[in-house]
């Protein structure tokens, strides 16, 4: 079960760039029902995977859960941000079992949102 926290509620984000694994760009193709994505690994992705024995399948599974269950439609993004438009842009910290995700949601059609992935 993923736990969503609006970063406005946090005193400290707890970001450590040495633990960054990459960024998943997501958008909805100008549609309310189709999601597209693209993965951008961090500079230390390969080293982190090897040194910390990270299971890529677990990472994929948690990212897929976020994208295809939690954010699979643009309507869900609008609901999570409580409105549509740039003024409703929100960032959330989502705590998974093995990873932390920082999700910047832009509830604007034809704009990209991003999932920043960090090791715990």
Image (cartoon, helix red, strand yellow):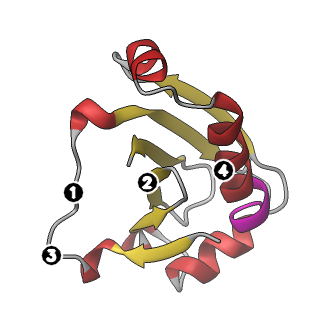
Local crowd at mark 4 within 10 Å, few (<14), some, or many (≥20)? some
Precedes in sequence: disc 4 or disc 2 = 4
Mark 1, secondary structure of its residue? loop
Q: Which residues are magenta?
A: 68-72
Query: Residue 100, which numbered label?
Result: 2
Mark-to-mark CA distance, 4 and 1: 20 Å
Mark-to-mark CA distance, 2 and 3: 16 Å
Local crowd at mark 2 within 10 Å, few (<14), some, or many (≥20)? many
Mark-to-mark CA distance, 4 and 2: 10 Å
Mark-to-mark CA distance, 2 and 1: 10 Å
Residue drawn 23% across the image and 76% down it: 10
Residue drawn 63% across the image and 82% down it: 79
Q: Are marks 2 and 1 in contact (CB under 8 Å)?
A: yes
Query: Residue 112, which numbered label?
Result: none
Query: Residue 11, which numbered label?
Result: 3
Q: Which residue is mark 4?
A: 62
Mark-to-mark CA distance, 3 and 1: 9 Å
Q: In which quadrant of the rendered image does the N terminus lie?
A: bottom right
Q: Are marks 2 and 3 in contact (CB under 8 Å)?
A: no
């Amino acid at each position: 079960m993923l736990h969503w926290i609006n970063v406005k509620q946090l005193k400290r984000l707890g970001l450590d760039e040495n633990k960054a694994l990459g960024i998943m760009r997501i958008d909805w193709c100008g549609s309310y029902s189709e999601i597209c994505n693209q993965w951008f690994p961090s500079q230390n992705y390969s080293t982190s995977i090897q040194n910390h024995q990270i299971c890529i399948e677990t990472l994929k599974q948690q990212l897929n859960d976020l994208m295809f269950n939690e954010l699979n439609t643009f309507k869900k993004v609008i609901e999570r941000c409580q409105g549509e438009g740039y003024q409703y842009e929100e960032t959330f910290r989502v705590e998974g079992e093995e990873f932390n995700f920082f999700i910047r949601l832009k509830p604007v059609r034809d704009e990209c949102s991003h999932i920043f992935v960090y090791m715990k």
